Image (cartoon, rainbow, N blue to C red):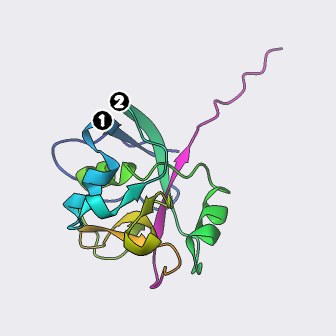
């Protein structure tokens, strides 16, 4: 299993599904409500209800395809079979590290953003590289890929 390096100055192509790679994020530099503002919304009308990434962290991830689920609850149930659903702030590291592929929206199944009217949303990156938040009960279209955090288990050493 190959592991790709952390973000460099030049964005690179997305790894294949199920291929493990590293991402680094400075959580303090990417406030969840600032993400809302950067996507063109008024953060005063939104709430963040989730866990925040604090400080600079590097973790291992992979992209998974989970078919055509009707809502985020189903997506999360399928994602946890592959690893842990990460905090939505990791979207910012995805945007910095990867160039658009023109094929798949890339979601993070973290329903921690609540917009006007109580609409619960998760962050994602469009296939063209733009970003937004999607309503958790309206996951439409084909080809979604979901970010999942993985932990590699070292091979056990057998002694004779």
Which disc, if any, is residue 55? 2
State whether residue 74 is above or below residue 20: below
Say the numbered circle drawn on residue 28: 1
Dot 1 crowding, Cα within 10 Å, few <14, some 14–19, many 20+: few
Q: Residue furthest left?
A: 9
Q: Which residues are magenta?
A: 140-160
Residue 123 is covered by the magenta coloring: no
Judge whether 72 appears above or below 18 on screen.
Answer: below
> Looking at the image, which residue sits at the far top?
160
Is 71 rendered above or below residue 121?
below
Q: Position of residue 98 (x, y in %)?
A: 27, 56
| Residue beneath the point at 48% across and 47% down | 61
Residue 128, which numbered label?
Answer: none
Residue 10 in the image: state x and y as whole percent. Answer: 16, 48
**Residue 119 visible here:** no
Q: Is residue 40 left or right of residue 90?
A: left
x and y, in percent, of residue 140 in the image:
47, 84
Within the image, what quadrant is residue 9 found in? Answer: top left
Residue 59 showing in the rendered view: yes
| Secondary structure of the residue carrying numbered label 1 | helix
């Amino acid at each position: 299993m190959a592991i790709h390096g952390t973000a460099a100055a030049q964005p690179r192509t997305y790894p294949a599904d199920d291929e493990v790679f590293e991402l680094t994020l400075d959580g303090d530099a990417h406030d969840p409500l600032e993400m809302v503002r950067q996507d063109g919304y008024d953060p005063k009308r939104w709430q963040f209800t989730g866990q925040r990434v604090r400080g600079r962290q590097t973790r291992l991830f992979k992209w998974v395809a989970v078919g055509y689920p009707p809502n985020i609850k189903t997506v999360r149930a399928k994602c946890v079979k592959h690893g842990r659903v990460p905090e939505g702030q990791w979207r910012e590291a995805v945007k910095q590290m990867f160039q658009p592929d023109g094929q798949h929206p890339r979601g993070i199944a973290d329903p921690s953003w609540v917009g006007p009217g109580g609409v619960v949303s998760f962050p994602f990156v469009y296939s063209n590289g733009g970003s937004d938040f999607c309503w958790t009960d309206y996951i439409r279209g084909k080809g979604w890929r979901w970010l999942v955090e993985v932990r590699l288990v070292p091979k056990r050493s057998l002694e004779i």
